[in-house]
Image: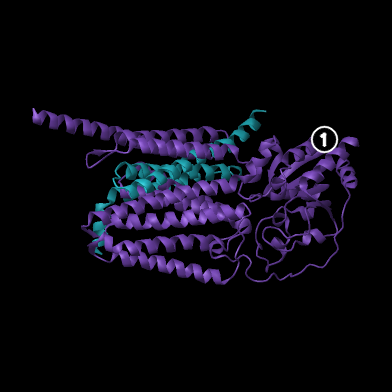
Amino acid sequence: MDTLIEITKVISFTLGGSILEVSYLIASVLFIIGLKMLSHPDTARRGNLWAALGMSLAILATILFHRMDGEPIGNIGLIVLAIALGTLIGWLIAVKVKMTAMPQLVSFFNGMGGAAAALISLIEFQHLARLGEPVNMGSGFMLAILLGLMIGSVSFAGSMVAFGKLDGRVGDIRNPVMRYINIAFMVVLTAFVVFLMTRGSVEAGAMLPYLYLFFAIALIYGVSFVMPIGGADMPVVISLLNSFTGVAAAMGGFLYSNQAMLTGGILVGSAGTILTVLMCKAMNRSLLNVIVGAFGGGPSAAGQEDGTIREISVSDLAVLMAYSRKVVVVPGYGLAVAQAQHLCHEMDKILEEKGVEVKYAIHPVAGRMPGHMNVLLAEADVPYEKLVESDDANPDMPNTDVVIVIGANDVVNPAAEDDPGSPIYGMPIVKARDARNIVVMKRGMGKGYAAIENSLFFHDKTRMLFGDAKGSLQKIVNELKAL
Amino acid sequence: MDSVLEFFYVHREAIFIVVLSIFLGIEVISHVPAILHTPLMSGANAIHGVVIIGAIIVMGHAHDTLSIILGFLAVVLGTLNVVGGFVVTDRMLEMFKKKTKK
């Protein structure tokens, strides 16, 4: 009889285990399919849902069928409570936040994932410490714990700083010294990993103080890693931190020989890295350049601009546009902050009625994330066909009567083409300069996010319209209606 | 050298998955249009929320108060990552869809 019970136990165990593994396999496949579908406009939304389905399956299967040394998942009530709590908060935040705040939101959620990964490592190590038995510090298991803790912490702290920066709560520290400090941090963290792993067989408890110190340094490094980075580089950092969290999650997969975590994490790690590189390419900068932070380094060769600023009145601008054949709008973050995308679309509809051809030239990094501007204009119902990428818009610039730059600065700065000393030299820009007339709508003469002078504002063909984008556009729309 | 080879042998399955996944990730992403960079980043962000599985495992085998508290926190944060990530991505993509229909 006893043997029969034993056998049933073994069978039920393998059955549950099989279901778990099959669920993980299906989840991994769904992640891959989801990512693939996310990279095509038509299938993107379904892709996201497939990936979410895979995730739900993996979570459910883990709760029901996971066994560690034959022991099922305990604390189920608390786990369900935690999931319910997280779902409620996450869902509320995600639904309530304005589309303009999307980049910081992605950064925030990314940080949460990083923190979860770091906590897992921390708990596992404390668990080892409580056992009071000597552990082999040089094992792959230990490496996964240490790397998970380090990468997760850096990702968490970095994401929180990035979140603060994008939200305008944290400033930049653009001191060249930061570069050396960060290199020093990297050396110290690497040294810590090597030190801990070469301890041989020791009681984990004795290593705890070192581990906490290691944890603290990783957190501080995360902060100082993102601190000097600013301007147009922000999206690159978020994407990079995103792939960091992926790797940290994969470390957890290594820890528990969990295939779903491993594939999901590494997939995001490598896809995130490629995405980061693609973004860097869009700005014609190397990843190293972004990380080490050449921005704000050497003084621009052009220095201060001398020139006169010429303003344009709202009514003149309305007339100018109404009698143009072709108008190109170059939207920037200023448009997004002012929540003026709907008004902008209203203006373009009125102009279209008057027979004016209106297009939007979208710089790859306009807004705070690549494609951010497309999302915002999509929110305002601007049709797809009107959004032109800057590479396609540029050849047609000389035939454009009016280029209207709304709340954008760096993406139209000719210094990217003319001034080898400029930090943005080499970045592809929207060649607003080539158009017949240029109108720049700006809040004031402040510099752009990258804090560099823009000679376009002083150009002969340029007229400035100062004021909040929303207010100005409203006036223009009223004028146009009256015409 | 021996220890490196031994490490490789012991973890060969995980290493296989890692290497293949790296190539897969690169392959899957490489042809994405710039318009989709943001939603894709956001979607990938949600997928690494898979870390929640680790949080559930750690929480499921926690017995002392500290581990339970930290584990609880890890599950909450992991869920935030998953749910927030997918919902935000869906919100972004919803707008693209509305537009293509018209």
Q: Quadrant of the N terminus of chain A?
A: top left
Q: Amino acid at mark 1?
A: Ile
Residue A277 visible, this angle: no
Q: Colour of chain A?
A: purple
Q: Colour of chain B?
A: cyan
Name the residue located 54 percent from the left edge and 65 percent from the top edge. Answer: A292
* A68 or A283, nearer to the observer: A68
* A102 or A212, nearer to the observer: A212
Name the residue located 82 percent from the left edge and 60 percent from the top edge. Answer: A459
* A243 or A164, nearer to the observer: A164
Name the residue located 63 percent from the left edge and 58 percent from the top edge. Answer: A231
- Which residue is tagged 1? A350
The answer to whether residue A74 is above or below residue A419 is above
Subunit of mark 1?
A
Residue A414 position, x and y percent, is 73, 60
Residue A24 position, x and y percent, is 35, 37
Name the residue located 80 percent from the left edge and 59 percent from the top edge. Answer: A457
